[in-house]
Image (tube, helix red, strand yellow):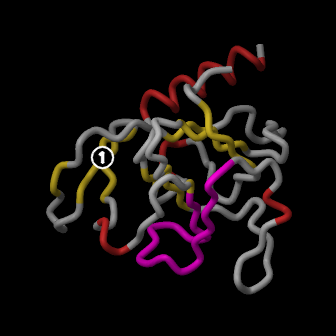
Amino acid sequence: MRSLRAAMITLTAAATLTVPAPAQAASGGPTGETFGVTTVVAPAASWSCPAGYFCIWRYTNPGSNTNRYSWYGNDGDYRNNHWDDGATVDNTPSAAWNASNQSNVVRFWPGVNYSFTSAHDFFLCLNPGQKIPDLRDFGLDFDNTGSSHMFVDQCAY
C-alpha cells in the first residue's frame, strides 16, 4: 500500500508541480497555479540558477543567490555538502530550481542515497526550467527535507 501511495503522490506532485506559462501578478512577478492556490514567484532577475544545473536555496522565496547550492550532476548524499557558514546542506533546502537545458527531470529525494524517509515516502519531480520558491507549498511539507537528487529522463518509479 505504501508503494501505491508513494506512486500516487509522486505522479500527482509531478503533474501539478509543472508550472504553466507565467502570467503577470499584481506585484509584477509571474504566477503559477499550484493545487488551486496561486503563488507569486519572485521576478527572474532576483535569483538565478546556471543553465544545466539543479539549484537549491537555504531559505524560501530567495531574493538573491545568497545561500544557493548548485550541482551539474547527481548527488546521493547532501551530508557531504556545506553552506558558507559550515552547516550541512542535508535537510535544509527551502527553494529549488531545475535549470537543466537538456530536458532532464530532477528527482528530489527526502533521504540520502535516493531513498524515502518515514515522514516522506515520495520524491518531488521538477521539470526542466521549473522553480519552486517555497517548498512548503503544495501541501506536501517538503521544506527542509531534501537529501539527494538525480537527473532522469522522466518522473517514474
Q: Which residues are magenta?
A: 55-73
The residue type indicated by label 1 comes to Gly
- Residue 64: say if magenta: yes
Question: Residue 1 appears at what percent x and percent y?
Answer: 77, 13
Helix, strand or loop at label 1? It is strand
| Nearer the observer, 49 or 111 | 49
Q: Residue at x 44, y 46 (%)?
A: 101
Question: Residue at the spot x=44%, y=42% of the render?
Answer: 128
Could you tell me residue 141's position as x and y percent? 61, 48
Please indicate whether residue 58 sits to the left or right of residue 2 in the image.
left
Choose top left, top right, bottom left or bottom right for residue 20.
Answer: top left
**Residue pictured at 78% horizontal, 61% vertical:** 90
Above or below residue 84? Residue 98 is above
Would you say residue 138 sits in the magenta stretch? no
- How many labels were placed on the picture? 1
Residue at (75%, 17%) from the top-left corner? 3
Residue, disc 1: 32
The percent coordinates of residue 67 (x first, y second) are 59, 77
Tell me if residue 91 comes above or below residue 82 in the rendering.
Answer: above
Position of the C terminus by quadrant = top right
Q: How dense is the environment of label 1, judged by Cα within 10 Å: few (below 14), some, or many (20 and up)?
A: many
Q: Residue 69, relative to residue 52: is it above or below?
A: below
